[in-house]
Amino acid sequence: MKIAITTFALRNWEPGSSGTLIEGIAPEELVAQCQRAVEAGAPLIDGYAPFCKHLFLNNRTPTRCGFAAITDDNRNLLRSGYLRRREGELAVLERWFEGLAAPVANHFDVILYSRAQLAKEAAEFPDDGGVPDGDWGIVSIIGTLEAAEPPMPPITQLRNALGRDQGGSGVAIDPERYEKAVAFWDRHAAVR
């Protein structure tokens, strides 16, 4: 099984992007670490759809978590606005911290999509770099304190339900997962 990285995932190395900003490791080395982990028997954990898997790696870099708990001490650092992740997507209302130093992440939650799903999404966004040469493509990396998937933000679930032509995956909302995500993200926010 071969793992590759998508151009979409490279936003994790772009300062100012919402979520985890990867530091201290190049994209190629992260891909190599993923490949070594899988070859050594690390499990791919099922994600929100059959085409989505999670691979957890120990973080040995200064990369910080992609989100933090909202407290009375940091609530004043919350911002919101309409954002799009790439040209061609609908802008959606998001919330994030600005000026907050999240804790250093203990793990990377590497989110992978199957080659077949990447091909479907590439048809909607042909200028996005196409489908990488691999069985699984890295679409995002989340710095976490625990080797567990944080709930997908409600707005991401809504975007996915809109379909691939709007920047989503075409997967309908699961009401139970949505409510769990609301409970989590009501108390947490992404860090920019």
Image: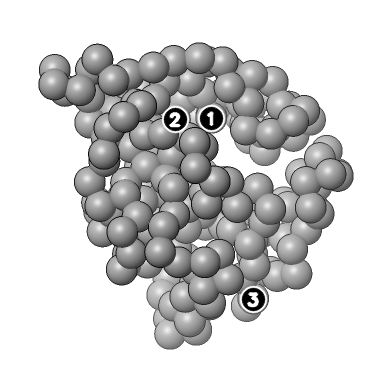
Q: Position of residue 57 (x, y in %)?
A: 37, 67
| Residue in the image at 44% along x and 30% along y | 153
Q: Is residue 44 visible?
A: yes
> Where residue 169 is drawn, which disc sits there?
none
The residue labelled by disc 1 is 156
What colour-coding does the image apply?
Answer: one colour
The residue labelled by disc 2 is 153
In 3D space, how far apart are the residues under numbered discs 1 and 2 (Cα atoms)? 5 Å
Q: Tell me where residue 125 sits by quadrant.
A: top right
**Mark 1 falls on what kind of element?**
helix
Q: Earlier in the sequence, mark 3 or mark 2?
A: 3
Q: Residues within 10 Å of mark 1 (few under 14, many from 20)?
A: some
* Left or right of 146 in this view: 1: right
Q: Are dots 3 and 2 in contact, CB under 8 Å? A: no
Tag 1: amino acid: Thr
| Residue in the image at 67% along x and 56% along y | 6
Q: Position of residue 128 (x, y in %)?
A: 78, 46
In 3D space, how far apart are the residues under numbered discs 3 and 2 (Cα atoms)? 28 Å
Image vertical order of residue 111 relative to residue 126, above or below: below
Q: Are dots 1 and 2 in contact, CB under 8 Å? A: yes
The residue labelled by disc 3 is 2
Image vertical order of residue 17 relative to residue 60, above or below: above
Tag 2: amino acid: Pro
| Residue in the image at 20% along x and 23% along y | 74
